[in-house]
Amino acid sequence: MTLAGRRVIVTGASSGLGAHVVRHLVGLGGEVLAVARRADRLEALARELEGAPGRVVPWRADVTVEAEVRATVAAAVDAFGGLDVLVNNAGSEVQGPIDGLPDEAFEGMLRANVTSVFRCTRAALAELRRSRGVVINLGSTVVSRPPRDRFGYVASKGAVEAMSRALALDLGRDGIRVNVIRPGIIPSELRGLSETEERAKFETGIAFGRQALSEVGDGRDIAEAVAWLAGDGGRFVTGAVIDIDGGFTLGAADPI
């Protein structure tokens, strides 16, 4: 597979799944604008990928802010001459029961997880129409298997799925594909645990039958799926919700 010539924006790119996606796409020859609020991490990622087949341009932005979203798309066009792929990965999570979650925490998740997808997609639309491009939104299997005390995150990711399916229909007439990738129990810095701590937790859950496959996935599994949808292989796929979860959604009824 090659992504040579593909011009990409990846949000939430400074760590976790976003950084894995950037590494993989650049390794396949893609030109990637890596977007996040942590400029120091973005610069480190760019240094790491010097000499790769593609190239990465670090870009600091808060994708919940409309003006910064517009500037992000303009930066991609300035750097690459256009845009073919938008990967909406940025997000946040605050856990807690409904009677213990402040309004600002719930609304903050909606801004980070839902409004950012809306704003980034809208800002990128003119360029994606020109290239007949693709939007890839990161969802979550928690929509199908909601854990306790994470209702706000579940609600936000459910909204991303619904919006993506509706947009796939609306934008299909422009040749734009819109799809969702739902990671399962994959270690991610979003949860605030180290990868070692998360791996031990997930292996315990897997041992109790909460996942069909007896191994732990990682960010590379998600990045491979993103690359496939971004490339020629996914040219006839739109409106899809793809689980990359080792069969987590098929497992026992009590999630981790």
Image (cartoon, rainbow, N blue to C red):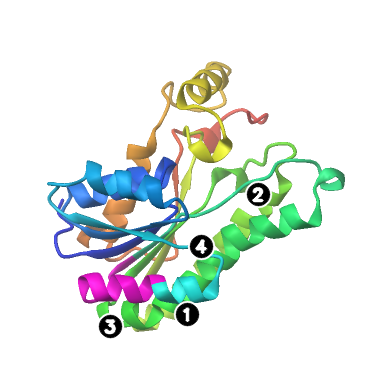
* Mark 1 residue type: Asp
Q: Which amino acid, by three-letter code, is at mark 3?
A: Arg
Q: Give the residue displayed 67% in from the left and 57% down from the top.
A: 108
Estimate the spatial distance between the alpha carbons at disc 4 and disc 3, rounded to whole Å.
Answer: 25 Å
- Which quarter of the picture shows residue 112? bottom right
Circle 4 or circle 3, nearest the eye: 4
Query: Quick check: can you spot residue 213?
Result: yes
The numbered disc on residue 130 is 3
Q: x, y percentage for residue 153? A: 65, 49
Residue 175 seen in the figure: no
Mark 2–mark 1 Cα distance, whole angstroms, equals 26 Å
Q: How crowded is the residue under tag 3: few (<14 C-alpha within 10 Å), some, or many (20+)?
A: some
In the rendered structure, find residue 62 and report the number of the disc placed on it: 4
Q: Nearer the viewer, mark 4 or mark 1?
A: 4
Of helix, strand and loop, which mostly describes the magenta segment? helix
| Circle 1 SS class | helix
Relative to the observer, which residue lies in front, 42 or 104? 42
The first of marks 4 and 1 along the sequence is 4
Instruction: Tell me the magenta residue range.
Output: 72-85
Magenta stretch holds residue 83: yes
Is 20 covered by the magenta stretch?
no
Q: What residue did someone put label 1 on? A: 170
Closer to the camera: disc 2 or disc 1?
Answer: 2
- Give 45 or 91, whichever is nearer the viewer: 45
